[in-house]
Amino acid sequence: MTRAIDCLVNVNMGDVKQPEWMYRVKEDYFKAGDSFLKSPELGELLEDMDANGVERSILLTRISKDVDRGQRFASERPDRFALGVGGFNLLRPMPTLRALESFVRDHPVVYATVGPSFWGDGMYPPSDAVYYPLYAKCCELDLPLCVNTGIPGPPIPGEVQNPIHLDRVCVRFPELKLCMIHGADPWWDTAIRLLLKYRNLRLMTSAWSPKRLPDSLLQYMSTRGKDRILFASDYPVLSMRRCLSEAAALDLTDDVRDGWLYGNAQAFFFGD
């Protein structure tokens, strides 16, 4: 069976009130059923992972005094789960940075994450100085940062997620381990050009059905980018079963597929 690390898994979708646009994404964009907004139980998620060869999942969470489902799962099964943390108030950076440092110290966090379209009314591209305190703190903590790229599914501003905004970030913060997430549509070629240019940059195929990935990315993945592309399902938005069965059907060599599904995430998020 193919081995995989699923780098972006949602386990709290059904536990929090979702904005109206999330239902529009569910119905208009993904044509999804009720499972789209479902929160799994621990045993259910482990069973799904085992059935599809997923050795480890990174669960999304937010900094909070309340222990959510993701934090509980990671605490109960640290051998199978790690955390990606988001929900930062970058307009008031110092309390956010103190909270992040404390949270990373006490939890198995392997990356921080921010979506430029999803806060501040979509007004701040990643090149804006409002992000700089977070970049500096992630460098200090040696903590990878995942940034949404590509036009988002929800009807919210998308220009701030053009990957070209990361060009200046990579120049100014070469120590920052940076990963584009949710693909880069329609700017795939820009993203690939940046990946060629910067050693500290990666791209994650979360929320993308593997059979829908562009040929240009598959070509890059198979040649100069064998160590640069990471797999994720964005479960339950897309199921692990669907993503991994489609990944197995792609015309990739075994070493390229294993790097994408497992090895690249192991190196970037978990080290040796």
Image: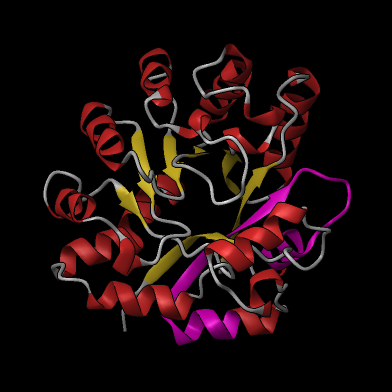
Quarter-of-image position of residue 32: bottom right
Query: Is residue 37 shown to the viewer in this render?
Result: yes
Q: Report the colour scheme.
A: secondary structure
* Vertical arrangement, residue 144 with respect to residue 246, above or below: above
Taking depth in this image into account, of 28 and 246 the one nearest to the observer is: 28
Residue at x-position 38% and y-position 43%: 184
Q: Quadrant of the N terminus?
A: bottom left
Residue at x-position 57% and y-position 86%: 47
Measured as percent of width and height from the top left, residue 150 is found at 44, 41
255 vs 210, left or right, is left
- Does the magenta portion include 52? yes
Residue at x-position 52% and y-position 28%: 160
Residue at x-position 77% and y-position 53%: 19
Measured as percent of width and height from the top left, residue 244 is found at 37, 75
Measured as percent of width and height from the top left, residue 252 is found at 16, 67
246 vs 180, left or right, is left
Quarter-of-image position of residue 15: bottom right
Taking depth in this image into account, of 121 and 144 the one nearest to the observer is: 121
Give the total number of marks visible in the rendering: 0
- Does the magenta portion include 28? no
Query: Is residue 272 shown to the viewer in this render?
Result: no
Taking depth in this image into account, of 132 and 156 the one nearest to the observer is: 156
Write the start and end of the magenta stretch as one range: 46-75
